[in-house]
Structure formats: C-alpha cells, structure tokens
C-alpha cells in the first residue's frame, strides 16, 4: 500500500476549500459570515489496529463525541460528532470524517457532514450541511485538536480556523500477521529456575507472573509436557502439564 503521504502545505488545502465554498453557495439568495467554537469528548469509541503491507501501523476508529458549541445562534448548543478516523500512527497522519449535529435553542438542529485531514494531533477541513432553517446552507472551514480516544479540543467553525495539510490514501490493505511460531516437548525436566524451564532439550522462558506457580508444582526430574510460543525472539512457556 502506498503509505499516507503529507503531500501539500496549508496554501494548497485553502485553495481546495475556496472552490468547495463557491460551488456550495451557487444560487443562494444571501450569504453571511458565521463563527463558532466547540469541544467534544468521547462517549463511545471502537478501535481496531493492524500493520499495513508497507509496514505502517494503522488505527481505524469509529466513535461518537459529545460536547458544547458556542458562537452564532445556528452554531450554539450541545454538539454531537460521529467520526471515523483512519490514522497512520507510525507517521501520525490520516483522515477524520463523519457527521455533526448541534441542538440549537429553537427550530431544527444544525447538522453537517465533514471531512478533515489529521496531521500530528490536529484536524482541518470542511463541514457542509444545513442550519436550523432548512433553507440556510452551512459551508464552514473546520479545525480542532483531535485524538481518537479523547475527542475534539479547541474546535473552530470559520473565524480563525487553522489551515490544514493534505494526505494521500493508498489502495492497499492491512497485511495478515504471520502465525506465531510454537514448540512443545514431553519428557523429564532437566533444569528449572524462576526464569526458565528445560524439558527434553527444549528451554523456554517462564513469564514472571507464572514463575511462582510453576516452581511450586514442578521440580527437576518430574515428567512434564510443555508448550511454548516464540515471543519477541524468545521461546516463552504458555502451558505445562504433568505427564
């Protein structure tokens, strides 16, 4: 998979946003500036991770974040953001996208879909939707600090919104993990200590939290069967039975 690449600076991102805004308000009867700030913490988070075919660590999170938005009337009220983030945690870049809803004081809620670029703890992008008046369309530059587990901090709609970067998502997929190498032996325990055990010529490290139990129930010259898994380059005991 072509890795996530930081491919453009802030000015390129701003150019793309200006085009989207022009298309978004075509045919509108009025246009006015609106500004809002927001913050939202995690309410429900589900994350899975994998290693991509180009050796990068990828975290994919689906989450809901809840908090408060303040500013113009259409941007003031409790805010809920549903987000799907795909972040290359090796290079700390990715994308965060989803939908948001602001429960305004009167009328219908303000809602929008958003797509942002994540770059070292910050997101910047565009939110497009409807204000509480169904005839009013919202097109807003959006930025915030972001973490998948923590949520959005210092969020902004319009105003002094921070410019963003750009990333490229490749077509590859997460690579399958190689199966762990396992070994086993059955016979006489020829050596036993707090840190390792040897049976029929196979020596395996004993995990620290299992050492006391193993040494309490087994001793040298006992007959046993051991099962071990290669962990970080070391054969490590996973199971022992008396034979």
Image (cartoon, helix red, strand yellow):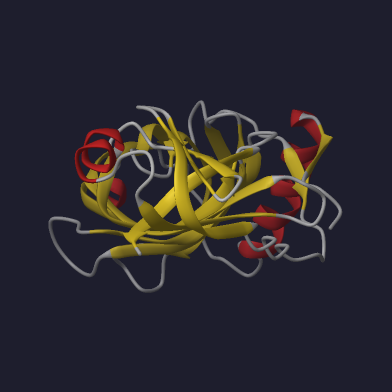
Q: Is residue 191 left or right of residue 171?
A: left
Q: Is residue 118 visible?
A: yes
Where is residue 238 shown, x and y percent of the image?
42, 53
Q: Residue at x 74, y 30 (%)?
A: 10
Q: Is residue 75 left or right of residue 94?
A: left
Q: Residue at x 41, y 72 (%)?
A: 135
Q: Nearer the viewer, residue 10 or 188?
A: 188
Q: Nearer the viewer, residue 36 or 234?
A: 234
Where is residue 70 shown, x and y percent of the image?
25, 38
Give the position of the N terminus as an image quadrant: bottom right
Look at the picture and state if 72 lies above or below 170.
above
Look at the picture and state if 242 lies above or below 195.
below
Where is residue 123 shown, x and y percent of the image?
55, 38
Q: Residue at x 76, y 45 (%)?
A: 167
Give the position of the C terminus as an image quadrant: bottom left
Q: Is residue 125 visible?
A: no
Task: Report the label total.
Answer: 0
Q: Nearer the viewer, residue 238 or 225?
A: 225
């Amino acid at each position: 998979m072509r890795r996530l690449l930081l491919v453009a600076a802030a000015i390129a991102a701003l150019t793309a946003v200006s085009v989207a805004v022009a298309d978004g308000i075509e045919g509108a009867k009025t246009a006015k500036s609106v500004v809002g700030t927001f913050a939202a913490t995690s309410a429900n988070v589900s994350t899975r991770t994998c290693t991509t075919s180009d050796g990068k660590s990828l975290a994919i999170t689906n989450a809901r974040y809840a908090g408060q938005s303040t500013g113009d009337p259409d941007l003031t009220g409790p805010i809920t953001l549903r987000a799907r983030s795909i972040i290359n945690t090796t290079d700390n870049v990715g994308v965060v996208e989803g939908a948001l809803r602001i429960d305004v004081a009167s009328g219908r809620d303000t809602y929008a879909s958003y797509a942002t670029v994540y770059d070292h703890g910050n997101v910047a992008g565009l939110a497009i939707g409807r204000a509480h008046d169904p005839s009013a369309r919202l097109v807003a530059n959006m930025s915030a600090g972001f973490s998948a587990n923590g949520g959005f901090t210092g969020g902004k709609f319009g105003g002094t919104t921070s410019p963003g970067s750009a990333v490229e998502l490749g077509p590859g997929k997460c690579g399958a993990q190689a199966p762990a190498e396992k070994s086993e032996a059955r016979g006489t325990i020829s050596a036993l200590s707090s840190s390792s055990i040897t049976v029929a010529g196979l020596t395996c490290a004993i995990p620290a939290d299992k050492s006391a139990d193993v040494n309490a129930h087994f001793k040298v010259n006992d007959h046993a069967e051991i099962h071990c898994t290669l962990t970080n380059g070391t054969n490590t005991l996973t199971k022992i039975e008396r034979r």
